[in-house]
Image (tube, rainbow, N blue to C red):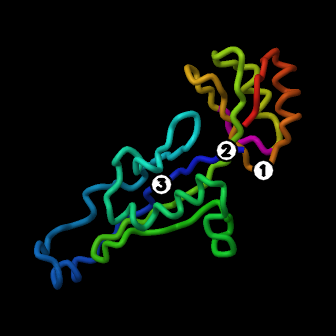
């Protein structure tokens, strides 16, 4: 099984009284870097390693300092915050800026990569996989040679192979 990490900007906050009291520019306002609803995806698979490039430089240093540990844990398949959140695959965190913090939702997204002999999208395979209990999504990575099967729970490799065979899709390996 493989893992990605999805980071969503939930909320931007502002404490103008603190900015007025402590900042060189008391009218700094909210964080200019992020917008509510923004999503960032991280993966470490098939030649990509978004963690070590800090998401391609898409994050401010203060935020990265606070959320990178959770992103790394998610990419390794670990429990982001066991016993603290209802779902150990999720964490709510914020950046260090005390006058204009940004609140993030960090999610571990589990998937299996089905390496396919045919690199094209297969609608029948997509429908069949989505009908399988525990599968929440399917994404064909054309040009990369595999399909990502997103999981809400563990799905045996044998079940994936049987579905692929029923759709006349040749799977060369599952990771």
Q: Viewer-proximal residue, 174 or 93?
A: 174
Find the residue positioned furthest to the left.
24
Figure quadrant of residue 25: bottom left
| First in residue order: circle 2 vs circle 3 | 2
Residue located 55% across and 20% down the image = 143
Tell me residue 56's x, y (percent): 37, 44
- Determine contact: label 2, label 1, CB under 8 Å: no
Quarter holding residue 80:
bottom right
Badge 2: few (under 14), some or many (20 or more) residues near its Cα, within 10 Å? some
Counting other residues with Cα less than 10 Å from the Cα at mark 1, is it few (<14), some (14-19), or many (20 or more)? few
Q: Main secondary structure of the magenta part?
A: strand
Numbered mark located on residue 2 in the image: 2
Mark with earlier residue (2, 1): 2
In the drawing, does residue 23 fall left or right of residue 78?
left
Q: Mark 3 — residue?
A: 8
Picture layout, residue 63 above or below residue 170: below
Residue at the location (63% across, 22% down)?
Answer: 145
Label 1, on which residue?
A: 153
Query: Is residue 137 part of the magenta span, yes or no?
Result: yes
Question: What element does badge 1 sit on?
Answer: loop
Percent x, y of residue 130? 75, 34
């Amino acid at each position: 099984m493989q893992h990605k990490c999805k980071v969503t900007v939930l909320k931007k906050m502002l404490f103008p009284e603190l900015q007025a009291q402590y900042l060189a520019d008391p009218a700094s306002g909210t964080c200019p870097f992020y917008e509510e609803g923004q999503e960032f995806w991280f993966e470490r698979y098939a030649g990509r390693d978004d963690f070590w490039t800090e998401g391609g430089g898409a994050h401010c240093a203060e935020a990265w300092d606070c959320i990178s540990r959770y992103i790394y844990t998610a990419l390794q398949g670990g429990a982001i915050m066991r016993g603290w959140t209802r779902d150990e695959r999720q964490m709510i965190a914020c950046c260090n800026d005390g006058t204009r913090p940004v609140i993030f939702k960090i999610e571990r997204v589990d998937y299996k990569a089905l390496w396919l002999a045919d690199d094209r999208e297969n609608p029948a395979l997509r429908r069949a996989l989505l009908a399988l209990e525990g599968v929440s999504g399917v994404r064909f990575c054309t040009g990369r040679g595999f399909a990502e099967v997103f999981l809400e729970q563990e799905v045996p490799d044998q079940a994936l192979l049987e579905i692929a065979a029923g759709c006349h899709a040749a799977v060369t390996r599952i990771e």
